[in-house]
Image: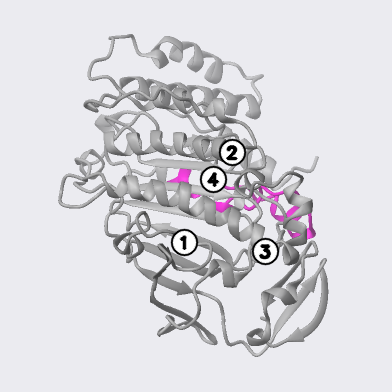
Amino acid sequence: MNFSRRQILRGAAGASLALPFMPSLLGKEALAKTPARPPRLLWLTTDHGAAFEGAMFPGNSPLTMQATVVPGHSVGAGPLVSSVQNGARSVSPILSAPSTDFTASLAQKMNVLRGLDVPWYLAHHTGGHMGNFAANDGGGADGVAVQAFPRPTIDQIIGRSPNFYPNLASVKQRVMVMGPRAISWNWSNPAARSGSIDAQKGETSSLNLFRSIFVPPTKPSRAPIADQVLQSYKSLREGNRRLSSADRQRLDDHIANMSELERKLNATANCGAITPPTDDASGHQTLQQADFIAWSNLFADVAIAAFSCGTSRIGVLGMGYYQSEEALGQYSGDWHQGVAHQASSNQPLLTRAYQTFFARVFLRVASKLEGMSNGVGGTLLDDTLMVWSQECGVSTHDSFSLPVVTFGSAAGALKTGLYCDYRRVNPAWVWLFSDGTMHSRIDHLTLRSRDLGAGSGSGILPSS
């Protein structure tokens, strides 16, 4: 009988025993106190993309610094320049908002990243934002091929890192996954890094999420949950020879998940006077712009409360629910077919939708974090990395030059106030693809967004 590599790996993983978390076995480094400035991560994603680069990115004049990353590939960077006109501060047409909200100091805590590519044609996807490229709709040969190689997303990887969480005493949620969009993925047994790679179910009620991360200063005493089933678990796993590898993996997953549940129940933190929310995101699931903005911000407010309290330091929110772009752009119809696939003739609508998201969701969250002290002379925004990523680049379905906008320095780990262009801006030639077919070679510097057209599957890739 022939076995696939995946079957062999799953069988090997099933032989591992996932034991409950035992602090006494950890080294001194893992038991150390949480740093004075623990970093936070808040990642927001939007579907589609397809806004032309002139609307999304600043012009090239700020790119005064150059660096060669590999022979023949130079990248550029420079200060992020904003200007104020008619009461609005702008970095680009999309990255603009009233200057009373988008202040000069906030602009200096922002980065705009251009030229980040996914080297495979994924078409539509949800996992590509944070690294699980296998989570795509199989719209092309590349997408089908990478579906065989699922992996955990970066939020879940750092959520299990003792370097990010050296002390879990107050942590109720390692990662707050918010909304129904499947953007976060992890092992079925994260503690053992074994099993299948599964989508992490997002919380659809911001009020329930608040209840899960707000920790009263006292907790009821209880017998350890895992202890109640541990003997039965050992007897079944070690004493039954008929147990298949897949069932052993299920048992390991179950006991490890119970151990994590026990850890959450024992987490304690005195969060002070945090007022419980009276509104719930689940009551704003309509296509109205005001409801979508409220839905987004209610989840973000819970993440901010968790960041300030220390009950979680990672949050991810997939914004592609109930056709979010239709709500943002106040468009009545099918955004996918009517706008994203006809991007050339719909740029004003695309620009307006994403500018609304930037000004009324992403910037609002940054402003709230900026207004909260981190207790050591800075703000919570200084200690947070906020990320906004889009599903596609300049052309719907294509992962070429994906726009990424950030706020915050992750507790000083990153420089801010920069515009970075990672494109290979001076290759002799590039290949132009349209619907998977190779066409003529053209000079990169002459390529413009309008040249790509609005058809499905058009884009560019650097030559090798």
Q: Callout 2: few (<14), some (14-19), or many (20+) C-alpha neighbours within 10 Å?
A: some
User: Please, is residue 361 above or below residue 110 in the view?
Assistant: above
Q: Give the CA distance from mark 4 to mark 3.
A: 35 Å
Query: Which portion, as a residue range, is magenta?
Result: 129-157
| Label 4 vs label 3, nearer the camera | 3
**Amino acid under disc 4:** Pro
Q: Give the CA distance from mark 2 to mark 4.
A: 19 Å
Counting residues from the N terminus, which is met first, the one under dot 1 or under dot 4? 1
Where does label 1 land, which residue? 96
Element at label 2: helix
Q: Give the CA distance from mark 2 to mark 3.
A: 52 Å
Counting residues from the N terminus, which is met first, the one under dot 4 or under dot 3? 4
Q: Mark number for residue 347?
A: 3
Taking depth in this image into account, of 148 and 427 the one nearest to the observer is 427
Q: Give the CA distance from mark 3 to mark 1.
A: 16 Å
Counting residues from the N terminus, which is met first, the one under dot 2 or under dot 4? 2
Counting residues from the N terminus, which is met first, the one under dot 2 or under dot 3? 2
Counting residues from the N terminus, which is met first, the one under dot 2 or under dot 1? 2
Element at label 4: loop
Which residue is at 74% across, 67% downward?
A: 344
User: Please, is residue 117 above or below residue 424 in the view?
Assistant: above
Q: Callout 4: few (<14), some (14-19), or many (20+) C-alpha neighbours within 10 Å?
A: many
**Amino acid under disc 3:** Gln
Element at label 3: helix
